């Protein structure tokens, strides 16, 4: 009988852990409402593509027309987390593409405290999961995340698709050697 109770306790704990999984903090993460809750920067060509998408359609198609980069930035995400897990799916066609995380000292995203940029390698033309954990500076009250394309080698304009953007609040971020993990 004790074993049955133990197994039931484990099953209940597992179900509670699954239900306790944090909700995605990004508004409109699948671009189902077009670019609502996302702001393009100057030099950006932004379209919603009903043919491309992963894991489901539609996706955001981002191209740059300037000599630098193009990006879309999410709406303000209020969080008291010490770190975030920021993930998305990317299909890079030309140039380079990546992501940015901006941190703010207030809940209205007016006082920026830091920015972290990661630019991935050139276009591979396949849907690739990108996942990065970012430690937030002390005093962070909100974040914005950005999706970016850059000019590639030989001046090739950036051209990429993005889908399923996900931001999860993390209570802790532990560095182990050169790697980071969350408990």
Image (tube, rainbow, N blue to C red):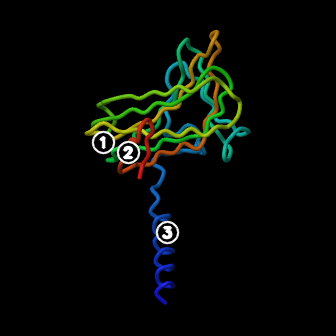
- Relative to residue 157, is residue 76 drawn left or right? left
The residue under the point 64% across, 37% down is 128
- Give the percent coordinates (x, y) of residue 18: 50, 64
* Residue 36 vs residue 17, the one in the foreground: 17
* Residue 50 vs residue 168, the one in the foreground: 168
Which of the two discs, 2 and 1, sits closer to the camera?
A: 2
Q: From mark 2 to mark 1, how far is it between C-alphas? A: 20 Å
- Disc 1 secondary structure class: loop
Q: Which residue is mark 1?
A: 141
Mark 3 is surrounded, within 10 Å at the Cα level, by few (under 14), some (14 to 19) or many (20 or more) other residues, namely few
* Residue 181 vs residue 67, the one in the foreground: 181
Q: Which residue is mark 3?
A: 14
Q: From mark 3 to mark 1, how far is it between C-alphas? A: 31 Å
- Mark 3 or mark 2: which comes first in sequence? 3
- Mark 3 or mark 1: which comes first in sequence? 3
The total of numbered circles placed on residues is 3
Q: Which residue is mark 2?
A: 174
The residue under the point 44% across, 38% down is 75
């Amino acid at each position: 009988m004790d074993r049955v109770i133990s197994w039931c306790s484990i099953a209940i704990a597992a179900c509670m852990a699954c239900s306790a999984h944090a909700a995605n903090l990004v508004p409109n993460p699948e671009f189902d409402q077009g670019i609502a809750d996302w702001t393009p920067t100057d030099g950006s060509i932004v379209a919603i593509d009903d043919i491309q998408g992963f894991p489901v359609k539609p996706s955001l198609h981002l191209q740059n027309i300037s000599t630098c980069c193009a990006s879309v930035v999410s709406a303000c995400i209020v969080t008291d987390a010490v770190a975030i897990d920021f993930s998305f799916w990317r299909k890079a066609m030309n140039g380079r593409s990546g992501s940015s995380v901006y941190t703010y000292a207030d809940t209205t995203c007016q006082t920026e405290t830091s920015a972290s940029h990661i630019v991935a390698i050139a276009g591979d033309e396949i849907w690739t999961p990108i996942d990065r954990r970012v430690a937030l500076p002390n005093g962070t009250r909100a974040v914005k995340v950005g999706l970016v394309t850059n000019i590639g080698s030989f001046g090739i304009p950036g051209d990429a698709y993005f889908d399923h953007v996900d931001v999860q609040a993390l209570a802790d971020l532990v560095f182990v050697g050169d790697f980071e993990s969350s408990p």
